[in-house]
C-alpha cells in the first residue's frame, strides 16, 4: 500500500504533489515524535480504536484493533458549502476565503499554530498514564483520546502546509519540537504545560481543558476561511468523545467516593482515604485547578485581538449562525467587573472587544451542566456535600484578573490572604502524592480500581468486560 493509501483523506491528497512532498518530509518526524512523546509502553499492543475513514455518518467511527503507531491518521474536512460566504464581521456576506487573505495572514497563522500546539501538548502531558490505568476500558479511552489529538495535529498541519507555504512548513516542524512543561521550549499555552500525571488529573483535564478546545474549535468552525471552518467542524465530532471521557470519568469517581463515604462512620476525608477512595475535598481542588487554568485559555476579557479576528471574519462566536441575528456585533456594549483602585467596579466595553469573555461564558454554562450531573450522582447516593465551580476570577493567570487575588467566591483579597488560604483551594503536594498512591494499574478483564465506579456501558457496542487492549 502506498503511503497515500495509508492516509485516509478527503482532500484529494493523491493529486496534490506539493502537499505530498510537504507531508513526506513531516511524517517521519511526526512518527519520531509519537515514538518519543506518545503513550509510554503499549505501542506494540492491539487497541480497540475508532478510526475516521470518511466524514459520512457511517465512516467516521470505524472500530477495530489497531497498534497505535499504525493508526491511520488522516486528513478530513467537513463537506464544503457551495457559494459559502463570510458569516460575520466587516466582510459579512462576501465570498468566503478560499485562500489565506494576505492582510490577515499573520493573524490566521497565529490562530492555527496556537490551536495546533495544544494537540501534541496534551499527548505529552498524558503519556505516562497507561502504566496506572484503572481498567482496560479506561486505558482504551486514554489511547483513543491520544491518537485523535494526534490527528488534530495533522488537521492543523494540513492547513499550514497547504496554505502557508514555507512559513507553514516551518511552523509544522516547530509543532513537533516544543514540549509540554519544558523550561526552554514549552508549549504555547499555560494549561498545556501543567503536569497531568494521575487519572484524576486526566479526567479533570478532558472535562475542562478539552472543553475549552470545543469552544475554540466551534468559534473557528464559523470562520470565513473555509478550509479552517471545515476542518474544525470535523474535529468537533471527535472532541465530543474526549469531553465524555472527562465528564463521565469524574462522575464515576464522585459516585464511588459517595459509596465509600456511606460505608464510614463520619464520612470524613480520613475515612475515605483509608477506604482507598478520593475524598470530595480533593476532587474539588482538582476541579478548581483545571477549571481556572482552562478559563485562561480563552484569553483576556477585554481584547483588541478578539475584535480584530471577528471584524476580519476569522473567528466567530459560539454558534454564530444558529444563535445570533446580528452578525455584525458593532453596536452592543458588554459590562464586566474589573479591578480599579483596589476594588471591583463595572466597566463597559464595546461588544467586539469582549468576545473572548462571551465565549468563556458559554463555556462556563457548559461546565455548570457537568457539575450538576456530578451533584446529581451525590444526591442519588444520598450524600449531602456538593461540588461547585469557583468564580471565573479565582486563580487566573491571564486577563483582567491575573494580577489580583480572589477567593473561591470571587471576592478580591490580598496576596497574603490568598497564600495563607490556597491550600484549601488547590491541590498541594500532599494531596497529589496521596492520589498517586491510589493509582495502581488494574488490567484484568472486567475489573476496576477501587477509587472509581465502572462505566454504565462499554465502547463501540462492546461491554465493559471486553478486552479493549490485548496485553
Ligand atoms: Fe484536539
Ligand atoms: Fe481533545
Image (cartoon, rainbow, N blue to C red):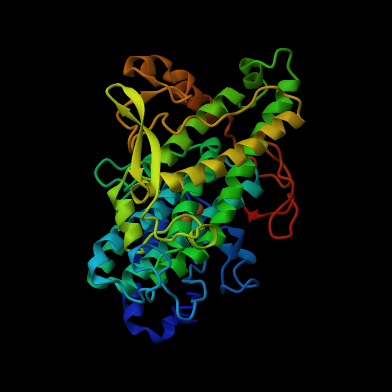
From the viewer's perspective, is residue 95 above or below residue 234? below
Task: Find residue 131 and report its horizontal and vertical position in percent.
Answer: 54, 42
Give the residue at the far bottom of this rendering: 15
- Rendered image quadrant of residue 229: bottom left
Query: Is residue 252 visible to the viewer in this orientation of the structure?
Result: yes
Residue 462 x, y percent position in the rendering: 74, 57
Q: As rendered, which of 84 and 323 lies closer to the eye?
A: 323
Above/below status of 338 relative to 119 = above
**Rendered image quadrant of residue 369:** top right
Q: Is residue 349 left or right of residue 325?
A: left
Depth check: 225 or 186 in front?
A: 225
> Residue at 64% of width from left, 71% of height from top?
57
Let me know if residue 437 appears in the view.
Answer: no
Q: Residue at x 45, y 51 (%)?
A: 123
Identity of the residue furthest to the front in this view: 331
Give how far across and how far down residue 404 sits, in percent: 32, 26
Q: Nearer the viewer, residue 79 or 265?
A: 79
The residue that appears at 39% across and 14% down in the rendered structure is 420
Q: Classify residue 141 as left or right of residue 111.
A: right
Q: Is residue 452 above or below residue 344?
A: below
Question: How many numbered discs sit on the rendered protein?
Answer: 0
Query: In the drawing, does residue 287 fall left or right of residue 14?
Result: right
> Can you give x and y, in whole percent of width and height, for residue 236 in the image?
52, 60
What is the quadrant of residue 259 in the picture?
Answer: top right
Q: In the picture provided, is 398 more to the left or to the right than 246?
A: left
Amino acid at each position: 500500500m502506498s503511503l497515500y493509501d495509508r492516509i485516509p483523506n478527503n482532500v484529494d491528497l493523491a493529486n496534490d504533489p506539493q502537499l505530498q512532498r510537504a507531508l513526506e518530509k513531516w511524517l517521519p518526524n511526526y512518527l519520531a515524535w509519537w515514538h518519543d512523546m506518545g503513550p509510554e509502553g503499549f505501542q506494540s499492543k492491539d487497541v480497540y480504536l475508532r478510526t475516521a475513514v470518511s466524514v459520512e455518518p457511517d465512516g467516521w467511527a470505524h472500530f477495530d484493533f489497531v497498534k497505535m503507531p499504525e493508526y491511520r491518521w488522516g486528513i478530513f474536512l467537513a463537506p464544503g458549502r457551495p457559494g459559502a460566504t463570510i458569516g460575520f464581521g466587516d466582510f459579512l456576506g462576501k465570498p468566503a476565503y478560499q485562500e489565506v487573505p494576505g492582510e490577515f495572514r499573520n493573524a490566521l497563522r497565529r490562530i492555527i499554530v496556537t490551536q495546533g500546539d495544544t494537540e501534541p501538548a496534551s499527548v505529552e502531558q498524558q503519556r505516562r498514564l497507561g502504566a496506572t490505568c484503572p481498567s482496560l476500558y479506561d486505558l482504551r479511552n486514554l489511547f483513543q483520546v491520544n491518537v485523535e489529538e494526534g490527528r488534530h495535529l495533522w488537521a492543523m498541519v494540513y492547513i499550514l502546509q497547504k496554505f502557508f507555504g514555507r512559513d507553514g512548513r516551518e511552523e509544522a516542524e516547530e509543532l513537533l519540537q516544543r514540549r509540554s512543561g519544558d523550561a526552554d521550549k514549552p508549549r504555547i499555552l499555560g494549561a498545556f504545560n501543567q503536569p497531568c500525571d494521575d487519572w484524576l488529573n486526566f479526567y479533570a483535564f478532558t472535562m475542562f481543558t478539552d472543553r475549552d478546545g470545543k469552544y475554540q474549535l466551534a468559534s473557528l468552525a464559523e470562520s470565513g476561511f473555509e478550509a479552517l471552518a471545515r476542518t474544525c467542524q470535523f474535529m468537533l465530532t471527535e472532541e465530543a468523545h474526549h469531553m465524555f471521557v472527562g465528564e463521565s470519568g469524574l462522575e464515576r469517581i464522585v459516585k464511588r467516593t459517595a459509596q465509600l463515604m456511606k460505608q464510614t462512620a463520619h464520612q470524613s476525608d480520613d475515612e475515605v482515604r483509608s477506604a482507598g477512595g478520593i475524598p470530595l475535598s480533593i476532587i474539588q481542588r482538582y476541579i478548581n485547578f483545571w477549571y481556572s487554568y482552562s478559563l485562561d485559555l480563552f484569553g483576556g476579557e477585554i481584547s483588541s485581538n478578539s475584535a480584530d479576528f471577528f471584524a476580519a471574519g476569522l473567528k466567530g462566536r459560539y454558534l454564530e449562525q444558529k444563535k445570533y441575528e446580528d452578525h455584525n456585533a458593532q453596536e452592543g456594549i458588554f459590562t464586566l467587573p474589573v479591578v480599579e483602585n483596589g476594588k471591583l467596579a463595572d466597566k463597559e466595553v464595546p461588544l467586539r472587544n469582549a468576545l473572548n469573555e462571551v465565549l468563556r461564558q458559554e463555556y462556563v454554562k457548559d461546565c455548570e451542566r457537568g457539575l450538576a450531573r456530578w451533584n446529581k450522582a451525590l444526591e442519588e447516593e444520598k450524600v449531602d456535600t456538593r461540588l461547585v465551580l469557583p468564580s471565573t476570577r479565582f486563580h487566573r493567570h491571564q486577563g483582567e484578573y491575573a494580577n489580583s487575588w480572589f477567593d473561591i467566591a470571587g471576592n478580591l483579597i490580598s496576596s497574603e490572604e490568598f497564600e495563607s488560604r490556597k491550600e484549601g483551594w488547590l491541590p498541594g503536594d500532599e494531596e497529589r502524592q496521596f492520589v498517586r498512591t491510589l493509582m495502581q494499574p488494574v488490567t484484568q478483564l472486567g475489573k476496576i480500581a477501587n477509587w472509581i465506579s465502572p462505566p454504565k456501558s462499554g465502547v463501540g457496542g462492546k461491554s465493559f468486560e471486553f478486552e479493549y487492549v490485548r496485553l
